[in-house]
Image (spheres, rainbow, N blue to C red):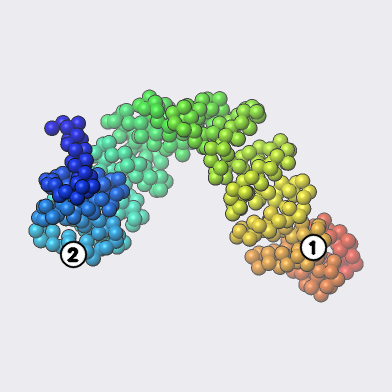
Amino acid sequence: MDFSQEEESSNKSLTKFESMLKTNNVLFFDSNEFENIIHHYLNQGKVALAKKAIKLGLEQHPTSTNLKLFRVEIFVFENDLPKANALLNELYVLEPSNDEIYIQKANILSKEDKHQEAIDVLKRALSLAEEISDIYSLIGMEYLFLDQFDLARDNFMKCLEANPEDYASLYNIVYCFDFLDKNEEAVEYLNIYLDKNPYCEVAWHQLGRQYYELKDFEKALSAYDFAIISDDTFIGAYIEKGKVLEKLKRYNEAIENYSITLSLEDPTSFALLRIASCHEKLGNNDLAVQYYYKTVHEDPLLDKGWIAITKYYSKQRNYQKALYYINKAINIDSENILYWKYYAKINHRLNFLEESELGYKRILELGNYELETWLIRGDILSQLGEQEAALSNFIQAAEFYPENAEIEFRLAGLYFQLLEIEKATYHLRNGLRFDAEQIIILEELFPEVFESLLVKKIISR
C-alpha cells in the first residue's frame, strides 16, 4: 500500500469512528485502526476523544500492548503517575523486550525530575529498538535538563546521523554549541553536515547565524544566500540576511530582503520595524514614519515599535509628537517601565515638571530603583517647591544607595533650606567624607546654601 492509500484508509477509519460516536452504534475496528485514530487525536490535542478511542479499543482488543501504552501516555499527560507506573509494570512482565515500555518509563522518571535515571532507562531501550533516532533525541533532552550540554549535543548528533532530516535535533545541536560558546566548532560541524546535505536550508541558516556571531559578515551573507537558493520561501533567511546587511550599512539591500518577507506571508512587526529603521538611516524620513506607523498598527503590544517612533520624533526635536505616541503606548500597557522613562524624559524636556515627576514616581512604583531616577525625581520636586517630598524621596534613595555623596549633598541642601541645621550639617559632612568632589552638586543646585558662611566653614575644615 502506498502513502496515499494509507492516508485514505486512515481517513476512512476516522470518519467511521466519529460516525459511530454520533449514532452510539458499536462498530468493529482492528487494533491498528484504533492506534491510528488515537494517534490522530493526540496530535490534534483532542485528549477526550483519544481517551474514548482507547477505552473502546481495549474493549475490543483487551490484550493489545500498544493500546495499553496509549493509556499510559494519557495517565502521564494527566500527571497520574502511580497508575501509569502500575500499568507499565504489568506490561513489562508480559513484554520485557518492548522498547516503548522503557520509553514511557523514562518519560515518567523525567516528570519526576529523575533525569539521570530516565537516561539509564532510555539507554536500555536503545538496545531493543529498531528505530533509534527518537531515543537519542530523548536522551539529549534529558541531558539538557541536567545542563550537561556536551553530552546533550553528542546524543542529538547521533540522532541526526540516524535521521539526517531531523531538523529539531539540528537546532538542538547548534543550541548546545551556542550555550558552550563554541561558535567555531559549530561552523566546522555545520560545514561537514552540509557536505553531505548541500541543499539543507536549515543548516545554511544556522551556519549564517554562527558566522554572524563570529562577526564574519561576508560569510554569513553567503550562507544565507545558499539557504535562500535551497528554499526561496525561507523567511528566516531573508530576515537574518537583512540584519547582516544592516551591520554592513547596506540599508537598501536590507530593505529589499525585509520586503520579500512581507510578500511571502502576513507582515511581521519585526520586518516593518527594521524597514523603518533602514529608511531613517538613509534619511528617507517620510518612508521611515510610514513604516513606524505600520509597525505599531500591526502589533500594538510591541514596545520596540512605540519606543522607535517616540525616539524618531525626539531626534527630530518634535517632542509634542513624541509625547503623543508614548502616551498611546502607556494607554496600551501602563506597566511598561520603558514607556514611563520616555514619558518622564520628554515631559522634562518640555519643562512639564509635574508630569515628568509623575513619570519618575511611576517608574519607582513599578520597581525600577536606578539612582538616576531617584536623583532626577528629587531635583524636580525641589524645583516645584516640594521640599518635604524631595527629602522623603532622597531618604528612600539612601536606603538603596548608602554612602552616596550625590544623595547626601542634596539632603544637606534641602535641610539647610528648611533651617534644620543639625541634620543639614550631618549630611554635608557625610557627602564630604564619601566623595568631596561632588560638592559641585551643592554649588549648582543650592547656590545660596553653598555661599553661606556655615557651609564655607565646614568645607574648609
Instruction: State the residue position of label 1.
Output: 386
Q: 319 left or right of 182? A: right
Q: 19 left or right of 287? A: left
| Three-letter residue code for mark 2 | Ala
Question: Which percent across, then down, holds residue 391?
Answer: 75, 66
Viewer-nearest residue: 73 or 185: 73
Viewer-nearest residue: 204 or 48: 48
For the C terminus, which image quadrant?
bottom right
Q: 350 left or right of 398? A: right
Element class at badge 1: loop
**Relative height, residue 260 to residue 305 (above, below):** above
Using the numbered discs, state the Cα–Cα distance from disc 2 to disc 1 in whole angstroms: 71 Å
Question: Which percent across, then down, holds residue 363?
Answer: 64, 56
For the N terminus, which image quadrant?
top left
Count the labels in the image: 2
Element class at badge 2: helix
| Three-letter residue code for mark 1 | Glu
Query: Alpha-carbon neighbours of circle 2 within 10 Å: few (<14), some, or many (≥20)?
Result: few
**Relative height, residue 410 to residue 192 (above, below):** below
Question: Which percent across, then down, holds residue 341?
Answer: 66, 51
Residue at x 40% of width, y 45% of height: 178
Of circles 2 and 1, which is in front? 2
User: Visible in this render: residue 434?
Assistant: no
Residue at x 28% of width, y 39% of height: 166
Viewer-nearest residue: 155 or 347: 347
> Which quadrant of the figure has residue 236?
top left
Most distant residue in the front direction: 23
**Relative height, residue 324 to residue 448 (above, below):** above
> Which quadrant of the figure has residue 211?
top left
Residue at x 40% of width, y 48% of height: 179
User: Visible in this render: residue 363?
Assistant: yes
Instruction: State the residue position of label 2.
Output: 86
